[in-house]
Image: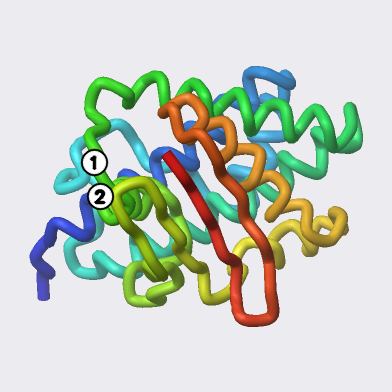
């Protein structure tokens, strides 16, 4: 039976596209086209530029989205391992920071927020943290110039650990990306802290 596309499916597809665009950015920046071919052979292709309703499997919408999410995570692990081997971790951090800045610059005209809750809604629409039903992220507190949100668990690092990359590398890369992304949106302060209760993010503006 064909399933019906809902707004959340388009949001999730956009989250995946943002991460796939990060893949493409890293591939071009570090000349990893042959590594990319290997990763695509192992884990499948990226989504296409066709409209979502054209390319998605309408008989398995959730499965289609989840398969592309997992494939992206696995390819990112492979690319990251190669970048660290050819360069170092710092090069990977700088690349994530640059992508964060470029993404923010490309979206700046569309970004509108007047309080922490609106900023959280915007961030939640671009950050890929599992499937929507996983409910990884939650708003903790917010006001006109302050936002705290939480990820209940880290669902990304295992893909990096599969590639024998350093512990906490993914979380440090997310910090590099978000610091640059939010800085380009004139957020005056950002920090993130991993605790046994989850990962806490704080922004002030």
Left or right, residue 107 beside residue 204: left
Q: Secondary structure at mark 2?
A: helix
Q: Residue at x 41, y 20 (%)?
A: 105
Left or right, residue 115 beside residue 127: left
Q: Residue at x 64, y 33 (%)?
A: 96
Placement of 87 over or under 117, stated as above or below: above
* Residue 92 on image: x %, y %: 75, 33
In the image shown, does 136 or 157 lie closer to the viewer? 136
Q: Quadrant of residue 65?
A: bottom left
* Residue 189 on image: x %, y %: 55, 40
Q: Is residue 104 visible?
A: yes
Q: Which residue is mark 1?
A: 114
Q: Residue at x 79, y 63 (%)?
A: 161
Q: Which residue is mark 2?
A: 118
What distance separates the C-alpha of mark 2 from that of mark 1?
Answer: 7 Å
* Residue 172 on image: x %, y %: 72, 49
Q: Residue at x 48, y 21 (%)?
A: 102
In the image shown, does 20 or 63 lie closer to the viewer? 20
Left or right, residue 201 beside residue 159: left
Q: Is residue 12 visible?
A: no
């Amino acid at each position: 039976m064909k399933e019906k596309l809902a707004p959340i499916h388009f949001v999730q597809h956009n989250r995946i596209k943002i991460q796939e665009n990060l893949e493409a950015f890293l591939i071009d920046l570090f000349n990893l086209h042959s590594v990319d071919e290997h990763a695509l052979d192992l884990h499948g292709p990226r989504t296409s530029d066709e409209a979502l309703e054209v390319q998605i499997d309408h008989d398995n919408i959730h499965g289609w989205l989840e398969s592309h999410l997992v494939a992206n995570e696995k390819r990112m692990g492979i690319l990251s391992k190669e970048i660290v081997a050819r360069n170092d971790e710092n090069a990977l951090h700088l690349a994530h920071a640059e992508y964060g800045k470029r993404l923010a610059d490309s979206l700046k005209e569309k970004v509108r927020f007047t309080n922490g809750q609106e900023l959280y809604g915007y961030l939640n629409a671009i950050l890929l943290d599992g499937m929507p039903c996983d409910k990884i992220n939650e708003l903790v507190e917010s006001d006109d110039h302050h936002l705290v949100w939480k990820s209940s668990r880290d669902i990304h690092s295992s893909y990096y650990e599969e590639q024998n990359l350093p512990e906490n590398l993914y979380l440090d890369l997310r910090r590099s990306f978000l610091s640059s992304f939010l800085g380009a949106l004139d957020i005056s302060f950002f920090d993130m802290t991993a605790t046994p209760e989850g990962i806490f993010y704080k922004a002030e503006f």
